[in-house]
Image: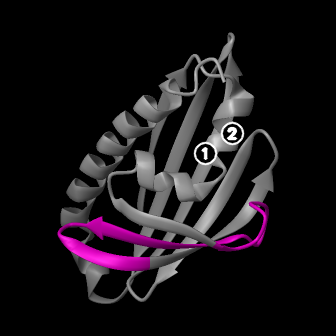
Amino acid sequence: MIDMQREVTTDASPEAVFAYLSDFSNSQQWDPGSLRTVRVEGDGGVGTRYANTSEFAGRTSNIDYEVIEFHPGTSLTLRGTNSSLVALDTITVAPKGTGSTVTYRVQFAFQGWLRWAEPVLRIFMKKLLDDGEKGMQRELNRLVGH
């Protein structure tokens, strides 16, 4: 299993940050691997489902995400699945001064033959997370004052 996290600090309020990040369809704006994310069911809380099309390691795949934990204003966890992957994405928002700190943790368990390629896939994951951190920082900074 690959388990990584990044932290982003912004001057945007925790309320604005959580409202933005808890709508996972916004991931296509900040996550360079997300080509398209659409809410297909639910109101954003537990049980909400998203259809995601991602590009990773040169391959395009569809991942079905479901919100499995939701703590209004502070955190949410999504579980993503397809035939080659089980992913857990946890987003936590905490106040920091007048702004916010976001912790974004991803856990990827590759299935089938891909689990044997995990050492190589870890390199791609690190780059994806580094780029996602930059994208999240950019988009959250746009929320300052909202």
**For the N terminus, which image quadrant?**
bottom left
Magenta region, residue range: 40-62
Q: In this rendering, would 119 be left or right of 50?
A: left
Q: Secondary structure at mark 2?
A: helix
Left or right: where 120 falls relative to 73: left
| Quadrant holding the C terminus | top right
Image location of residue 89, percent across then percent down: 55, 57
Q: In this view of the protein, can residue 10 be seen by the observer? A: yes
Residue 142: x and y in percent read 50, 27
Please name the predominant secondary structure of the magenta segment in the image: strand
Chosen colour scheme: one colour
Residue at 43% of width from left, 55% of height from top?
Answer: 28
Left or right, 40 with reference to 61: right
Give how far across and how far down residue 68 sits, in percent. 72, 67
From the viewer's perspective, is 131 left or right of 137? left
Tag of residue 124? none
Amino acid at pointer 1: Leu
Q: Residue furthest top?
A: 97
What residue is disc 1 on? Answer: 21
Residue 82 magenta: no
Q: Is residue 4 visible?
A: no
Residue occupying image coordinates x 64% and y 53%: 23
Q: Residue at x 52, y 44 (%)?
A: 104
**What amino acid type is highlighted by mark number 2?**
Phe
Residue tagged by mark 2? 18
Q: CA distance from mark 1 to mark 2?
A: 5 Å
Q: The residue tagged with tag 1: helix, strand or loop?
A: helix
Q: Residues within 10 Å of mark 2 (few under 14, many from 20)?
A: many
Crowding at dot 1, Cα within 10 Å, few <14 / some 14-19 / many 20+, comes out as many
Residues at marks 1 and 2 touching, judged by CB atoms closer than 8 Å? yes
